[in-house]
Image (cartoon, rainbow, N blue to C red):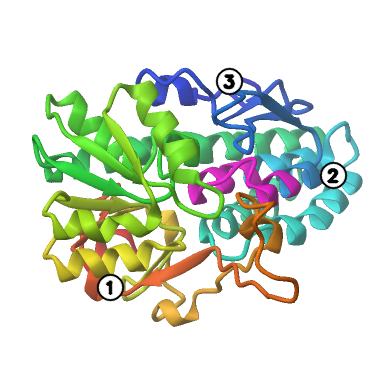
Amino acid sequence: MPGGPAESTASEAWNLSFMTLEWVGDIDGALHILDQTLLPKSQQQRILEQPSDVVEAIQQLAVRGAPAIGVAAAYGLCLASRGCEQIEQVRARWDAALHPMRQARPTAVNLQHMVDRMDRIARSPSCADLDGVSLRARLLEEARAIELQDQQFCRAIGAAGADLIPDGGTVLTHCNAGALATAGQGTALSVLYQAWRSGKRFRVLADETRPLLQGSRLTAWELQKSGIPVDVICDGASGSFFQAGEIDLVITGSDRIAANGDAANKIGTYTIASLARAHDVPFFIAAPSSTFDFSLDDGTQIPIEQRGESEVWSLAADERPPEGIGYKNPAFDVTPASHIHGWITEAGLLQPPFEAIR
């Protein structure tokens, strides 16, 4: 039903007592998100009532993770006509919201895919003769369907990858690809959750993930809540763990995957993949089909978001380089397909050309 609650993130995410995002109310409702900029110190909801609120939350990383921002964008478009009844006003506000939402973050293709999916519904023949209220109800119904599909995909990804996790082994992950990054139980972490449920026991090494510490702030917090043992390591320390033979498998998420399998993920992922390859440790990407961009031949065509100076110096406000020193802050890098053992999707463990999800 358009006005009914979608299946909750909390129920999806095993025993994790938080909601990454939730639409509250009917067509005049609002999007509630867990503000991830405040974690782990404070677990606070942020209420978003306008499309611009959602764009800002996405850009600030208050809501983050490729699948989660796709779902948030779908609901964000529903906010465009909040309080409107006339069809002309509904469509005008819809059109005005599309471009800013689509451009909120350039690398994660899920966001663009979900904005385009919502727009196809808005412009479909079946919606051409609807009045304003009916169109808004149909669009909210589609946003809920996007959320539910992401939850289903997360479960399927976990089931597809759980057998890969070595019982008694150590798994390295980078950034956060858990329930905090999706509307469900995560992508890479869904694999770990499913393996743990099946009775396997292992430990996780979580890279801190500079500059905003999504590994130490988010992944470690989430895994601690789940009861899975986790240790945080500095980003530069993983080489020593590979060298010592203390890493059995690497698994991460992705924000965009090209047709040949090249995968963009949080900056530092390519370094880890290169180390894994050098030490014959399998490296896997876990992502839904909505993360694949078959319009791009390879990873050289993936746009890489460049973020601000304040993030680089955020942990060293009193120990900055000498005045006049510049900075570079790419948010993502691209791991070549040659470094990836397999791509774990809702359709199973795949290899290029990914026929099962095209």
Residue 184 location (% of width, % of height): 43, 33
> Dot 1 corresponds to which residue?
337
Q: Amino acid at mark 2?
A: Val
Above or below, 74 against 35 in this view is below
Q: Looking at the image, is mark 3 or mark 2 nearer the viewer?
A: 3
Residue at the spot 27% in from the left edge and 51% down from the top edge: 251
Quarter of the image for residue 331 reads bottom right
Residue highlighted by disc 2:
90
Q: Main secondary structure of the magenta part?
A: helix
Give the secondary structure at mark 2: helix
Q: Which structural element holds mark 1?
A: helix
Distance, label 3 to label 2, CA atoms, is: 23 Å
Are the residues tagged 3 and 2 within 8 Å (C-beta)? no
Q: Residues within 10 Å of mark 1 (few under 14, many from 20)?
A: many
Q: Amino acid at mark 1?
A: Ala
| Real-space CA distance between mark 3 and mark 1, rounded to the nearest whole angstrom | 39 Å
Q: Is residue 71 magenta?
A: yes
Q: Nearer the viewer, mark 3 or mark 1?
A: 1
Say which quadrant the N terminus sits in: top right
Label 3 with label 1: CB-CB less than 8 Å: no
| Mark-to-mark CA distance, 1 and 2 | 44 Å
Image side of residue 106 versus residue 97, left or right:
left
Which residue appears at 68% of the width and 75% of the height?
326
Compared with residue 152, is residue 210 higher up or lower down, i.e. above or below? below
Q: Earlier in the sequence, mark 3 or mark 1?
A: 3
Q: Within the image, what quadrant is residue 36 found in?
A: top right
In contact (CB < 8 Å): disc 1 and disc 2: no
Residue 5: give its label: 3
Q: Residues within 10 Å of mark 2 (few under 14, many from 20)?
A: many
First to last magenta residue range: 56-73
Amino acid tagged 3: Pro
